[in-house]
């Protein structure tokens, strides 16, 4: 469940990154549009100046050279923006692939977890059946000779009449109540 939450957080972070990239792309397009609008206005001003300065060839050549330089800059800027846009598209595709990979990893992890739980359930069911069989056998036994029981020093608890220890009977772990010596002597 912790992995699932972490994967959900990772997915949310990736989604936020994709949204941020989309916002950045929109801003870049807006900047490019403003730049293009500004260039159009500048071009109109240059055209008006050309019409007024037709007689002055030298001034026209200077204005034309300036326009060419600006156009080259715009072309370079446009090419740079296009490269940046293409890079963002590649990054977006990579992020989408990462999201898909994370989803696949999460599904595989869930499958493994389900298999593990199924195995645990099977083991638990087998253990429960074994305990049931032991209980059935224990109901059949009324008195067990002490020589058939191997008592250990491991204590499970104690009370006012004695203490309970772990023992083994026929290879199975059992609990044995050992009476205190004072009580055992009075019986």
Image (cartoon, rainbow, N blue to C red):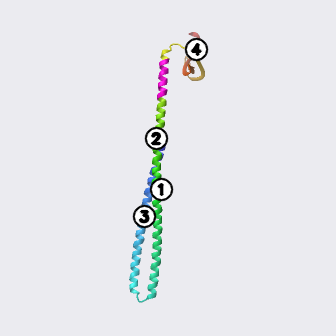
Res. 38 image quadrant: bottom left
Percent x, y of residue 132: 47, 22
Res. 32 image quadrant: bottom left
Tell me how far mark 2 sits from mark 4, CA to CA.
50 Å
Q: Which residue is mark 1?
A: 94
Nearer to me, 94 or 144:
94
Circle number at residue 172: none
Rendered view: 118 above or below 39: above
Crowding at label 1, few (<14), some or many (≥20) Cα neighbours within 10 Å?
few
Q: Which residue is mark 4?
A: 146
Question: Would residue 18 appear left or right of 179 to someone viewing this image?
Answer: left
Q: Earlier in the sequence, mark 2 or mark 3?
A: 3
Please identify, in this view, whether the residue under mark 4 or under mark 1 is nearer the observer. 1
Tell me how far mark 1 sits from mark 3, CA to CA.
21 Å
Q: Earlier in the sequence, mark 1 or mark 3?
A: 3
Disc 3 is placed on an element classified as helix
Percent x, y of residue 12: 44, 51
Q: Which residue is mark 2?
A: 111
Crowding at label 3, few (<14), some or many (≥20) Cα neighbours within 10 Å?
few
Q: Which residues are magenta?
A: 125-137
Percent x, y of residue 19: 43, 57
Seen at 47% across and 31% down, the residue is 122
Seen at 45% across and 86% down, the residue is 59
Please identify, in this view, whether the residue under mark 2 or under mark 3 is nearer the observer. 2
Magenta residues, dominant SS class: helix
Q: Earlier in the sequence, mark 1 or mark 2?
A: 1
Seen as rendered, the residue at the extreme bottom is: 55
Pointers 4 and 3 in contact (C-beta within 8 Å) = no
* Residue 44 shown in magenta: no
Circle number at residue 27: 3
Pointers 4 and 1 in contact (C-beta within 8 Å) = no
């Amino acid at each position: 469940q912790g992995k699932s939450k972490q994967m959900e957080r990772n997915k949310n972070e990736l989604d936020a990154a994709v949204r941020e990239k989309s916002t950045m792309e929109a801003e870049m397009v807006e900047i490019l549009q403003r730049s293009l609008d500004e260039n159009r206005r500048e071009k109109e001003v240059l055209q008006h100046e050309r019409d007024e300065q037709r007689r002055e060839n030298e001034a026209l050549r200077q204005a034309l050279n300036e326009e060419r330089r600006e156009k080259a800059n715009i072309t370079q800027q446009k090419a740079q923006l296009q490269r940046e846009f293409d890079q963002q598209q590649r990054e977006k595709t990579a992020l989408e692939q990462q999201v898909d990979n994370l989803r696949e990893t999460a599904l595989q992890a869930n499958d493994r977890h389900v298999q593990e739980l199924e195995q645990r359930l099977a083991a638990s069911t087998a253990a429960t059946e074994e305990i049931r069989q032991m209980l059935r056998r224990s109901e059949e036994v009324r008195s067990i000779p002490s020589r058939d029981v191997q008592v250990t020093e491991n204590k499970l608890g104690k009370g006012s009449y004695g203490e309970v220890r772990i023992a083994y009977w026929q290879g199975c772990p059992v609990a044995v109540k050992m009476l205190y010596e004072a009580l055992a002597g009075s019986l």
